[in-house]
Image: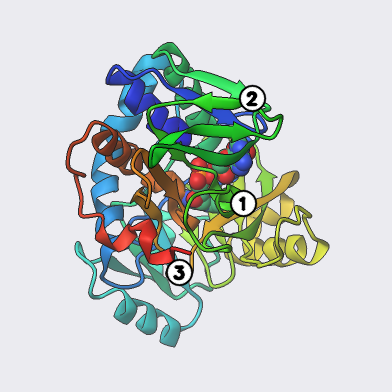
């Protein structure tokens, strides 16, 4: 969120400094699976579903601009997302659950599913297809974003741990770092992901943003086993063009503990091999975990705060990769004194004020 906003602002002539306690992209934004699931992730009508849909429309142009600026292939693929079921009753339930969505996801019977993704388990009874959903490779995306932002003039400072927001005359004037130094700025955007609530002076309740750990296991095969992203009952699979398949993911409230656990790896592997039996012969790649910035109502904290000049872009929970371009566009509009391109009331940080 920080880097995407920085790039957007720099392109509009602002001079932007990104303060990062680690290295840019060290956390959730490089650990994500990269599903751009505007529809698969929408479980009901509402502001998040609307925001996600707007973002899906922005994505092709946004990654296009990044790819042109850097010559990096971000792995953006309009591959569609499938949600599959092993039982006939589960398939009926699935079809009923998504019937409200527009465009309405297509229901695929077993044969159509097998034709589209031949490596899927032949025991599957069918699935629903979200043809407008897509995928991207978050590490490549982040690398492109970092380079594009730096070329546009953004300065990244690693190892800068932000402690609190500094106020002057009733507005944000900068931030204080943990080495005691003050960094001044006319606008301050806090985009500290799962650690946002630890930054002092934001006017939000402690625990307004909490970490939800997600673990991922990567498998490698000579050829990709899937083209589409596939959601099964117990795991999702995200293919990369080079033959890697990501298996995700757990949802765990365990604070900031970074372990990859034996039980999670076992469960993810079992679920993946059940979905695609050929993955039983795959070689094991990397495993990792990171933290989704969760809010109680599962909506981001996005927009102005109690303090003029202080903006928040956090709490994107399961969909921060998808929501990056719209978040950046919103931040850039607000900092320039313009209206947000989408209504912000549902995302107002004030709803989690201290
Ligand atoms: C396992 C997993 C799978 C996911 N899959 C998907 C997916 O498929 N699709 C999708 O759209 N989203 C996905 N997400 C969610 C997505 O990754 C997040 O919503 C998004 O990356 C959040 O971005 P962010 O910039 O808010 O946080 P982060 O990327 O975590 O960035 C926050 C940065 O702030 C820095 N920081 C924190 N505190 C301070 C401080 N005090 N001072 C200085 N710097 C600080 C951190 O070091 C970090 O680099 C997934 C997340 C996880 C964990």
> Does the CB distance between marks 2 and 1 fall below 8 Å?
no
Q: Is residue 124 in sight in this rendering?
A: yes
Does the beta carbon of the residue at mark 2 sit less than 8 Å from ligand 1? no
Under tag 3, what secondary structure? strand
> What's the mark number on residue 84?
3
In this orientation, which residue lies closer to the viewer: 283 or 20?
20
In this orientation, which residue lies closer to the viewer: 286 or 284?
286
As displayed, is residue 277 above or below residue 220? below
Asked which quadrant contains residue 29, the reply is: top right
Under tag 1, what secondary structure? helix
Residue 51 percent location from the top left of the image: 28, 54
Tell me which label, 1 or 3, sits earlier in the chain. Answer: 3
CA–CA distance in space, label 1 to label 3: 39 Å
Does the beta carbon of the residue at mark 1 sit less than 8 Å from ligand 1? yes
- Read off the residue under disc 1: 198
> What's the mark number on residue 310?
none
Q: Give neighbour class at mark 1: few <14, some 14-19, many 20+ (Cα, 10 Å).
A: some
Left or right of residue 325, residue 215 in this image: right
Ligand 1's quadrant is top right
Residue 175 percent location from the top left of the image: 54, 34
Residue 26 percent location from the top left of the image: 64, 36
- Read off the residue under disc 2: 158
Q: Is residue 27 in sight in this rendering?
A: no
């Amino acid at each position: 969120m920080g880097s995407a906003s920085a790039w957007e602002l720099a392109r509009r002539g602002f001079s932007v400094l990104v303060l990062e306690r680690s290295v840019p992209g060290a956390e959730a934004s490089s650990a994500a699976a990269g599903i751009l699931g505007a529809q698969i992730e929408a479980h009901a009508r509402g502001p998040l579903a609307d925001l996600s849909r707007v973002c899906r429309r922005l994505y092709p142009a946004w990654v296009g601009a990044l790819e042109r600026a850097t010559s990096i292939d971000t792995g953006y693929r309009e591959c569609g997302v499938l949600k599959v079921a092993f039982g006939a009753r589960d398939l009926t339930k699935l079809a009923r659950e998504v019937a409200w969505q527009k465009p309405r996801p297509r229901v695929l019977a077993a044969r159509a599913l097998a034709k589209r993704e031949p490596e899927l388990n032949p025991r599957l009874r069918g699935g629903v297809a979200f043809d407008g959903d897509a995928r991207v490779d978050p590490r490549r995306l982040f690398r492109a974003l970092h380079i594009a932002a730096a070329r546009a003039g953004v300065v990244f400072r690693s190892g800068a741990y932000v402690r609190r927001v500094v106020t002057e005359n009733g507005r944000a004037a900068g931030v204080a770092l943990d080495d005691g130094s003050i960094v001044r700025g006319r606008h301050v955007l806090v985009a500290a992901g799962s650690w946002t609530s630890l930054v002092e002076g934001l006017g939000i309740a402690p625990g307004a943003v909490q970490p939800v750990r997600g673990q991922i296991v990567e498998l490698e095969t000579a050829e990709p086993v899937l083209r589409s992203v596939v959601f099964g009952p117990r795991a999702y699979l995200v293919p990369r063009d080079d033959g890697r398949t990501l298996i995700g993911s757990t949802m765990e409230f365990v604070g900031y503990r970074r372990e990859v656990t034996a039980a999670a790896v076992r469960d993810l592997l079992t679920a993946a091999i059940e979905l695609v039996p050929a993955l039983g012969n795959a070689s094991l790649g990397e495993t990792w975990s990171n933290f989704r910035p969760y809010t109680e109502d599962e909506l981001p904290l996005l927009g102005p705060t109690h303090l003029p000049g202080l903006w928040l872009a956090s709490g994107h929970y399961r969909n921060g990769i998808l929501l990056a371009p719209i978040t950046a566009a919103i931040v850039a509009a607000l900092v320039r004194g313009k209206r947000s391109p989408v209504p912000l009331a549902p995302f107002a940080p004030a709803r989690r004020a201290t």
